[in-house]
Image (cartoon, helix red, strand yellow):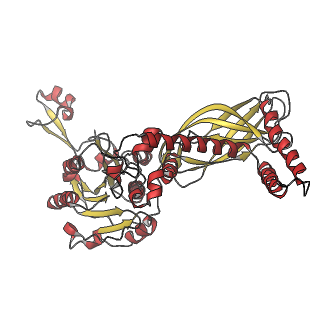
């Protein structure tokens, strides 16, 4: 297979481009982008706003005083050059030393600013003034393998130059790997061996586990042009939950359905220990139903009989089958599922989350069963599934079909395979509501297909219009 950069792969879909090997030219590009990004970050974090003003002024004076025979502006350039070069050297001799204690909550949420505090202690016998505190997040630069084999979405539509030099791919990969945007905070003056509490803010950008490894303390030079960074290890881990959109009362499909174990089933996992009567043992009754005191008294096996009632139990099916692990469409589908899950507290029903990741699993919340926070944790860790067929999700849902009053399917495609899955649920007499998430800007019209006649339960939402789409969806009325 030929190389993806200007050697015959122009116009191929991203899934094909992404399988290409590491090449010498890609290594060359990666090395230069890697060094350039590192240098940019190094200067950006160490030069203060006053320092940038001095740098720009020095450059302007250099342009003006390029001819030393006409003016003396070059003397100002020399002075500023001495200051710019000298102050970083002075910061290298800084002997500042700090201890840090970070106090962060267990959870954050994508798109919601995370507020927490950091206790900074001065370990030296001298005052520290003008100190700033910022998070030292993990390096977002991609590896050579990731840079070489992971294309930007719609990269094949870019011009020849951009496809060859892959600069936009580099920028896009850094955006995908950057889990949060740190916000720098000013620290009050620190007395010798004193400590202060600093309020910090962080904007989570990606869901999933986030590890905060180090805090950087910025110590400026005497004239405030440059600062040294003292890095202090302070390991903390938190979980970033998916973005959630406001969803009004949702008209979910289906009604009450017979559930073995009755309402007691909705207050614990498994069957309730409460019973309404005793009866003789019948072949096939589980041993855990045996009422041992009655057996000992009568000399024959007696079992407990449970209440059987009807209540609503919905399935929330999340489609994880996509070839693009960084798909924004997939991320919005997870957000939609999380938004639906949050409505369970307003409804007297159960909700089963059915999803396939490394393995197929379900999780139930509602009416005292499970925890909504736990379901949010599950959704925060969901990843795109590329090593299993879609039929694994179909088998999982069908195995629960007899228990479901209705099913909400959040899908990433509306192909024959997924329509066959919906038809299977319909044949089991399970009412289905389909929410199809499509890429932003996709103008291809999706026909209802197997949902024909139930158009009010078939919703197509673009990835960049999810909030508006969910608002419209919650206003529809189920039949």
Q: Answer above or below: position of 427 versus 40.
A: below
Q: How many marks?
A: 0
> On the rendered image, what quadrant is the C terminus found in?
bottom left
The answer to whether any part of residue 344 appears in the image is yes
Q: Residue at x 88, y 53 (%)?
A: 68
Give the image location of residue 347, x and y in percent. 38, 59
Give the image location of residue 18, x and y in percent. 36, 47
Give the image location of residue 470, x and y in percent. 41, 66
The answer to whether any part of residue 381 appears in the image is no
Q: Residue at x 86, y 43 (%)?
A: 223
Check the image and name the residue furthest to the front. Answer: 69
> On the rendered image, what quadrant is the N terminus found in?
top left
Q: Residue at x 10, y 36 (%)?
A: 284
Q: Quarter-wise, where is residue 335 in the image?
A: bottom left
The foreground one among 311 and 171 is 171
Q: Answer above or below: position of 351 versus 271.
A: below
Check the image and name the residue furthest to the left. Answer: 283
The foreground one among 16 and 454 is 16
Q: Answer above or below: position of 204 versus 284.
A: below
- Left or right, 82 with reference to 268: right
- Left or right, 443 with reference to 216: left
Give the image location of residue 195, x and y in percent. 77, 34
Q: Quarter-wise, where is residue 381 in the image?
A: top left
């Amino acid at each position: 297979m030929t190389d993806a950069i200007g050697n015959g792969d122009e116009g191929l879909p991203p899934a094909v481009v992404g399988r290409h090997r590491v090449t010498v030219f890609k290594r060359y590009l990666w090395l230069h982008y890697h060094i350039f990004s590192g240098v940019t970050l190094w200067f950006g974090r160490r030069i203060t706003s006053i320092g940038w003003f001095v740098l720009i002024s020095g450059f302007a004076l250099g342009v003006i005083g390029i001819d030393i025979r006409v003016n003396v502006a070059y003397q100002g350039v020399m002075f500023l050059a001495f200051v710019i070069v000298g102050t970083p050297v002075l910061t290298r001799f800084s002997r500042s030393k700090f201890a840090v204690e970070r106090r962060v909550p267990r959870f954050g949420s994508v798109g919601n600013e995370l507020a927490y505090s950091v206790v900074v202690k001065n370990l030296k016998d001298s005052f520290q003034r003008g100190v700033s505190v910022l998070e030292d997040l993990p390096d977002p630069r991609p590896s050579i393998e990731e840079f070489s084999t992971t294309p930007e979405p719609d990269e094949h539509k870019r011009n020849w130059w951009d496809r060859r030099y892959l600069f936009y791919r580099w920028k896009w990969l850094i955006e995908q790997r950057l889990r949060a945007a740190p916000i720098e905070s000013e620290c009050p003056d620190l007395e010798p061996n004193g400590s202060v509490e600093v309020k910090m803010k962080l904007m989570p950008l990606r869901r999933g586990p986030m590890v905060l490894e180090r805090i950087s303390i910025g110590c400026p030079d005497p004239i405030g042009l440059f600062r040294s960074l003292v890095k202090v290890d302070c390991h903390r881990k938190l979980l970033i939950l998916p973005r959630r959109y406001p969803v009004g009362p949702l008209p979910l499909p289906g009604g009450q359905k017979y559930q073995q174990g009755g309402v007691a089933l909705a207050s614990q996992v498994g069957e309730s220990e409460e019973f309404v009567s005793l009866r003789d043992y019948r072949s096939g009754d589980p041993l855990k139903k045996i009422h041992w005191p009655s057996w000992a008294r009568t000399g024959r096996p007696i079992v407990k009989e449970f209440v059987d009632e009807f209540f609503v139990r919905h399935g929330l099916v999340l489609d994880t089958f996509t070839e693009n692990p960084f798909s924004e469409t997939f991320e919005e589908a997870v957000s939609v599922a999380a938004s639906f899950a949050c409505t369970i507290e307003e409804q007297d029903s159960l909700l089963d989350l059915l999803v396939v990741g490394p393995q197929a699993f379900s999780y139930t919340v509602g009416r005292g069963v499970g925890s909504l926070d736990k379901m949010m944790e599950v959704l925060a860790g969901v990843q795109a599934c590329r090593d299993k067929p879609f039929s694994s999700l179909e088998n999982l849902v069908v195995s629960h079909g007899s228990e479901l009053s209705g099913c909400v399917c959040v899908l990433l495609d509306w192909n024959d395979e997924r329509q066959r899955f919906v038809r299977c649920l319909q044949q089991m007499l399970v009412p289905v509501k389909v929410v199809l998430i499509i890429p932003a800007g996709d103008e291809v019209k999706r026909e209802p297909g197997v949902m024909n006649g139930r158009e009010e339960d078939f919703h197509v939402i673009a990835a960049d219009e999810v909030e508006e789409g969910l608002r419209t969806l919650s206003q529809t009325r189920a039949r």
